[in-house]
Image (spheres, rainbow, N blue to C red):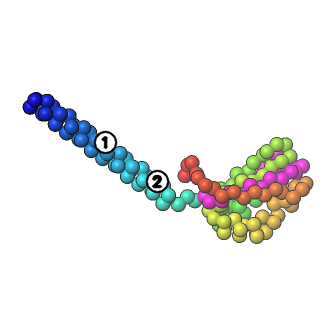
Amino acid sequence: MKLIKKTVFVVVMLAMIGCTSKTNTNSSTELADKKVMQESSNLKSKASVMLIVKATTELSDEEFLRIAKEREPQFNAIPGLVQKYYIKIRPGEYGGVYIWDSKESLKKFKESELAATIGKAYKTIDEPSVEVANIMFQLRE
């Protein structure tokens, strides 16, 4: 009988130790997860807003790129512009994807002479289409 009581006692103690270490592991994992999430939310991304401009033109690829290169210094000088991608959607349809640090920077650009001259500079056939999107998550810095 004593042997059975001792065995039950040992089994119960081992179970308690197992539960305690499992609980501690889970809570330490949860704490680590929370810390990672908090650190990621504290990181301030440079990118906040995306502007996508598309237009149709009769320009060739070479003409489009020449004009883009001529205007490059002006775009490099814009405060708050994190990145700009020059894109070709299909023959005769080109565009720009702009990444901004804030809505305020985008607003200032939209009010600028440089923005107002996009259609004229690229000899667009019709009014450029414009889309604005908030950047929710950035895969890489």
Viewer-side residue, 46 vs 64:
46
Compared to residue 3, the image places residue 134 above or below, namely below
Compared to residue 67, the image places residue 4 above or below, namely above
Stretch in magenta: 47-70
Q: Is residue 12 magenta?
A: no
The quarter of the image holding the N terminus is: top left
The spot of residue 69 in percent (x, y) is: 75, 54
Viewer-side residue, 12 vs 122:
12
Q: Residue at x 35, y 45 (%)?
A: 26
Q: Which residue is mark 1?
A: 22
Q: Is residue 71 visible?
A: yes
Q: Is 32 situated left or right of 112 in this image?
A: left
Q: Residue at x 58, y 59 (%)?
A: 46
Q: CA distance from mark 1 to mark 2?
A: 22 Å
Q: Secondary structure at mark 2?
A: helix
Q: Which mark is residue 37?
A: 2
Q: Residue at x 85, y 59 (%)?
A: 119
Q: Is 126 situated left or right of 99 in this image?
A: right
Q: Is residue 66 visible?
A: no
Foreground disc of the pair 1, 2? 1
Amino acid type, residue under disc 2 in the picture: Met
Q: Is 134 situated left or right of 116 in this image?
A: left
